[in-house]
Image (spheres, helix red, strand yellow):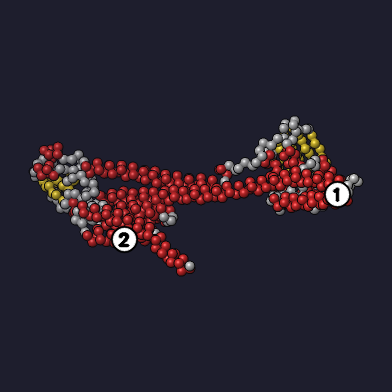
Amino acid sequence: MLRRGGNSGATGAPGAAVGPVVRDIALWVALAGAALVWFVGHPEPSVALELVLPLAVLAVAIPARRRWPVATLCAVNALCAIGLVHPLTPANAYVLALAVFACLLGSGPTGTRAALLTLGGCLAFDLALCAALGVSVVWWYWTLTIVPLALLVPWLFGRYWQARLALVHGGWQRAGLLERRQRLVAEQARLRERTRIAADMHDSLGHELSLIALRAGALELSPTLTGQDRADLGELRAAVSDAVGHLRDTVGVLRDDGGDQATAPTTESVGQLVDRARDSGVTVDLRQEGSPAPPGLSPLVERAVYRVVQESLTNAAKHAPGAAVRVRITHEAGRTRVTVTNTAPEQGRLTPPGSGGHGLAGLRERVEPVGGTLRAAPSGHGFEVVATLPDRPTNTGRDPAPPGDSESARQLTAARRRTRLRMAAAFVVPGGFALLSVGSAAYAAFQLATCVLRPADFADLRIGQGRAEFAHVLPARQFPYVSDSVTSRPRPTGTVCEFYRSNGSLLDQVDVYRLCYDGSRLVTKDVIPGTDG
């Protein structure tokens, strides 16, 4: 049996790893397909530098990203830098891989600070490479717009996705917690029902059995009975007494509250309670003012008033021995106010009640469920307990805490707030960045498109013509981003040169036309290849 269990566990481990392996292979195939499509249509491709090496790096980086997410992102960024050293265009297919790895970085366990440092480091490396290579404006524009978009936007989306998954997971955890709490509430309701059953048995059935035993004892003394009848009645009385004992034991098992086991019968009034306290040597002054409105106090409120006075007298005798106690019960406007105040003890210092006991907590359990309030605090050199109760209960069960006051609700609110912030960052920040990039791209495209001299018009230009003769075919503005290598080319002494692009391509390096004038007369026209600029 043990061998079989071990085999099953051993065979299950590879199956658990099949899922990640399949996903890694699928991701590599997708990225490799995009790279192959780009490679086929790319001018002057290099098989080793632009296909074999990058695909080998991706094959290693994809499974390694789980353990080294930062290092793999930097490696993929280096693949994008291959485009920066290309003489024709800075773009390549590995920007897509860079976006995928940035998204995986955002959805992983990497912290925000480490991730931002990584993204900033990748961008700084690309900019330093551009500066070291002395690339033209197109390469700079690519590095300052496309690369940050490929890094930042997917990373923010990955963070949002991670927060959303965490929120869903936290929601399921809280659902499980609520289910456990619901079972606990059901168990508490069952225990309360057991306590009510015990009270009913004690108050009704116990009372009836006691009466039966009393009647049996009276009949046992009747002179008209025979000896056998008296023996039978004696056995009946003994059986009833045993039944009362068994009932008491059963009630003790059913009652799980562990509370008021030594309380006086509910039929005892507050006045009788105070008289018993006086007989015990406690100085008590009882005053009752007003009377409850018809039909009088509810039995629940009466028991609550009784328990407030009883617990207060017990606390006074325990924590302030020898102190005088004043009890005031006031009925007015449909409410009953109970105030119990004791003076300082004759010797020693007053010990605040409730330090280690559960009396005041038990009082609140009596007062609050019927809609009342309880306040217990030092008063002068003594202590005061004030309970205010409605004559009729307004709430027979404790209201649940508002949802916003629970710890789980606060955690859920905080998780939702974090998710909303990440969602806003995932869309608003990139949206603003995209608008800025689109605006700058549109302006750059406008500049490049309005400085294009058509090749046919350039071919028609003749040396010695005045500028006014062909000014109508010249673009509205000159090419503003001429590299230093182009402007430093030799030219006739005393001439002024103008530069125009041969087409409006934004990412490709195009030929540049140079027209040099002596005054207003065209003296030279040159074609500078794009690879030289």
Residue 197 picture location, percent across and down = 69, 46
* Circle 1 SS class: helix
* Circle 2 SS class: helix
Q: Single out the residue that lies furthest toward the bottom.
A: 3
Q: Residue at x 33, y 42 (%)?
A: 435
Q: Is residue 212 left or right of 69 when viewed as pictured?
A: right
Name the residue type under label 2: Ala
Residue 402, by quadrant, is top right
Earlier in the chain: of badge 2 and badge 1, it is 2
Q: Residue at x 56, y 43 (%)?
A: 403
In three-dimensional space, the C-alpha distance between marks 2 and 1, rounded to whole angstroms, equals: 103 Å
- Above or below 129: residue 315: above
Can residue 507 be seen here? The reply is yes
Name the residue type under label 1: Asp
**Mark number displayed over residue 412:** none
Can residue 90 be seen here? The reply is no
Q: Single out the residue that lies furthest toward the right.
A: 223
Q: Is residue 370 left or right of 105 when viewed as pictured?
A: right
Q: Residue at x 51, y 50 (%)?
A: 173
- Above or below 199: residue 80: below
**Mark number displayed over residue 59:** 2
**Mark number displayed over residue 229:** 1
Q: Are marks 2 and 1 in contact (CB under 8 Å)?
A: no
Q: Residue at x 25, y 61 (%)?
A: 52
Q: Nearer the viewer, residue 267 or 50?
A: 267
